[in-house]
Image (spheres, helix red, strand yellow):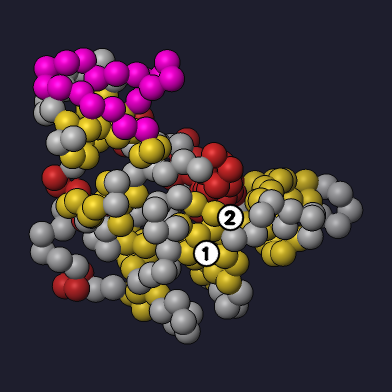
Amino acid sequence: MWLYKHHTASDIIDLNHETGQWRPVADEEKPKSARVLADLPIRGSYEEVNGKPYFKYWTDDNRHVFRTFDGKVFEICRKLPDGSTIEATPGLHCVIEPAKYADGRLREGMSDVSLVAGDGTVLYTLTYDSGYFLRLYASDFTAAAMVQDLSDWDFFVALKGGIEIFAERAASGKIPLAITGTTAMVEGHEVPCDDLLYCDTGEVCPRSGVWVCIEDMRQGQMVRKNEKMPSLDGNDVTWVWSRER
């Protein structure tokens, strides 16, 4: 499976989930039609800490896992056929806190990240240079910075946030729009990403039919062309067209 280097969104590798072996993906292997990262069959990302790689990705059987350089694999959640999510280890969470020396002094710019089970058992822990990613984030003045946050730079902040999102989805039963590579699952049918039709609350509906909320596809409404797109529970949301009726 293909993974990108998290803080650069480049340097794609091909990881074998069964063996843990990986190799760089050459430019000539990428589809000529690919314009951006989203056009490629990417399953997750990786980062290196002191030259040692760490990975987080979706497996072919829809399990989201965190993998360490030494072959430890921690399953975070599973996506069921209907698009809903269940926790693989209920209560699993990630803790990031300032790193300290043995005498209690803070290690400036360094953080400890721990994967912790619901009963408080620490499953895995490591120390990394979090200050490096914070500096990269703070120094990004490109247009992309308007929609990015620290998790787009810091692999472990993204890991922590992802675990929290998956836990919330499992508890609520929400079924978000799922995009894998160049296709998306909309109410059980596969749609090329280029064919997806989105519309936000308050905008004029461009096509009659059933529109579903991208944050929870159980929430659908019939909207006719030229009507204003509705809100959901009083909130502005993004809708995606699903079917005629």
Q: Is residue 225 magenta?
A: yes
Q: Position of residue 194 (x, y in %)?
A: 14, 47
As shown in the figure, which amino acid type bears the numbered disc 2?
Glu
Above or below — where is 225 with respect to 79?
A: above
- Say which of 229 and 124 sits in front: 229
Q: Residue furthest right?
A: 103
For discs 1 and 2, the disc positioned in front in the rendered view: 2
Label 2 sits on residue: 87
Residue flagged by tag 1: what amino acid is it?
A: Val
- Provide the secondary structure element on which disc 1 rests: strand
Residue at the image position 38 percent from the left and 38 percent from the top: 218
- The numbered disc on residue 65 is 1
Relative depth, front residue between 106 and 126: 126
Instruction: Please state the horizontal and vertical placement of residue 43, each as a whole percent of the image.
Output: 37, 62
Residue drawn at the location 32% of the way across and 61% of the way down: 42
Work out whether 4 lies above or below 187. below
Task: Name the secondary structure under disc 2.
Answer: strand
Looking at the rendered image, the quarter that the C terminus falls into is: top left
Q: Residue at x 27, y 58 (%)?
A: 181
The disc, 1 or 2, on the residue closer to the chain's N-terminal end is: 1
Quadrant, the N terminus:
bottom left
